[in-house]
Amino acid sequence: MLTGKAFKFGDDISTDLIIPGKYAYLRSNLPELAKHVMEDADSTFASRVKQGDFIVGGNNFGLGSSREHAPLVIKMAGVKAILAKSVARIFFRNAINLGLPVLVCDTDSIGDGDELEIDLQSGVIKNKSNGKQLAFGKIPAVMLRILDEGGILPYIEKHGDFRL
Amino acid sequence: MGKTIAEIILSTKSRSDAHAGDIVVAQIDLAFVQDTTGPLTVRQFRAGGFKKLANSLKAAVFLDHAAPSQSREMSNDHILLREFARQTGALISEVGDGVCHQLVAESLAKPGDLIIGTDSHTVTAGGLGAFACGMGSSDVAIGLGLGRTWFRVPETFLVELKGKFAEGVSAKDLILYLIGQIGADGATYKALEFGGDGIGGMSISQRLTVSNMAVEAGAKVGLFPAEETTCRYLTEQGRADHYTPITADGDALYQRVIKIKLGDLEPMVAKSHTVDNVVPVREVIGTKIQQVSIGTCTNGRLEDIEIVARMLEGKHRHPDTRLIVTPASRDILMSATAAGYIKTLLEAGAVILPPGCGSCLGLHQGVLGDGESCLSTANRNFKGRMGSAEAFIYLGSPATAAATVVKGEITDPREFL
Ligand code: SF4
């Protein structure tokens, strides 16, 4: 069971908003890079986010570049899951590969600052701030297996190959 | 049941009868990294316990995004990548050789190949009939080590093109129009396949422009069939032996068919800050522009530079508008120099950047300041993409860019015909 606060963002949160290309020179210095997480979308995010919180987006979350650094800096910030109405393909795969759950659901009823409780097993999100319940779409079976092992590297370490 | 190009390639590479929706593990022909995503790939490769590259694939490392490097940090990343290439035998493309996607198209990609790269615009090679898709560093690290990775076979949207472009209209206008129609997530997880008699008149350079931006509609790949034009291109590149024809089966099952008459298209631009914010140029005519950037893996090819040079012959950039031209590869720069295009551009007031990504990602050279507007031939106009989050990026064709730089404001290129 995951519990934390929602940080609400709009549609089309691109990888440039999550971690701009201009900081590419910091990519081998992850602690420094992570300080800029979500900077161009909300410059106060990095200082306000706490371990266990959630990022909640709208449509097409994570569109743009293939930079795995985008989900990586989100994970480093302590975020335990991303909720969005839809997710760009490469970002989705990258997040799962890092062991960061991405849950597709109708995020309209979630407000900024809402307290959420997420049950990954049953697929239910409880919004403790407004009493509403939400179901999220099933994570595809292959990705669930990768997520269950904590990401693609632990998965391959354990299985030695893709066992789909 | 017949197959789409995506299903045909993934069936061959997974040695199975693959259909949309299936999960397959497929053999990779080429896996590559560039200098901003490569270092993490190398670290994940090592963390995964891999020592050598899988024998079955080609691997390549491109130093193109920071080329030449603008900072000590990027230089250190380049050192790491050069060492990795030396240790593993991966091909290395040095600073100044060009943008990864252009070099992959020029010398590595073959029709029917399965290609993965740690860059979302890996889709570009779809213009040659390769199933080429972008992935993150961990996926490519494992691909490099195992020689294979998993795929969900995508459903395909067929984009049926009819007729010919009108004068002043090109492939860039087509793909902008399409993205404007279906939206930035209109083809998420899907394969876009281009067909119809209209593709016959499209050069490889134009096809690469279209495939390059398939990802801006969310697509996994942007595929053209490989036919005579592809054969001619590969022959010109001295690799006729790389040609195999690829076309979809006549009875292939498409999830959606989108028909476009090329002759009906007009010059288009995408306004900031999303690529699907597309309007005809005539709706934004007169917008003041401080920088025009021509180049990138979308439109930095010889044909693009030729269009711009011909339009700028005897003209000069507007005094309030800078002109930055970045050829996509060394070969292109050499050909453009030999043809006299570079001289024309310099006389028109252009700055020529070394082949590579140039100003595209805001990392160095050509970074925008607060409140500035740029008309770029690139593929992305996201907020903050070219430096300042307070800047505005408009995407357009090389012809629109050339017309705009002369007048200092967004201009319909047909005025110059
Ligand atoms: S030119 Fe731009 S879009 Fe193309 S690979 Fe370089 S940074 Fe990416």
Image (cartoon, coloured by chain):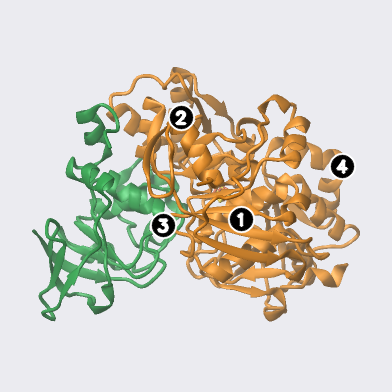
Chain colours: A green, B orange
- Secondary structure at badge 2 equals helix
- Kindly identify which chain the residue marked by label 4 belongs to: B
For the residues labelled 2 and 3, the Cα–Cα distance comes to 23 Å
Residue linked to disc 4:
B339
**Residue A89 on image: x %, y %:** 40, 54
Mark 3 CB lies closer than 8 A to ligand 1 = no
- Image check: B302 left or right of A31? right
- Secondary structure at badge 4 equals loop
Residue A156 in view of the camera: yes
Residue linked to disc 1:
B366
- Image check: A78 left or right of B161? left
Q: Which mark is residue A15?
A: 3
Of all residues shown, which one is farthest toward the right? B314
Residue linked to disc 2:
B81
Query: Mark 3 is on which residue type?
Result: Thr
Query: Mark 4 is on which residue type?
Result: Ala
Q: Quadrant of residue B171?
A: bottom right
Q: Are marks 4 and 3 in contact (CB under 8 Å)?
A: no
Query: Mark 1 is on which residue type?
Result: Gly
**Residue A87 on image: x %, y %:** 36, 60
- Kindly identify which chain the residue marked by label 3 belongs to: A
For the residues labelled 3 and 1, the Cα–Cα distance comes to 20 Å
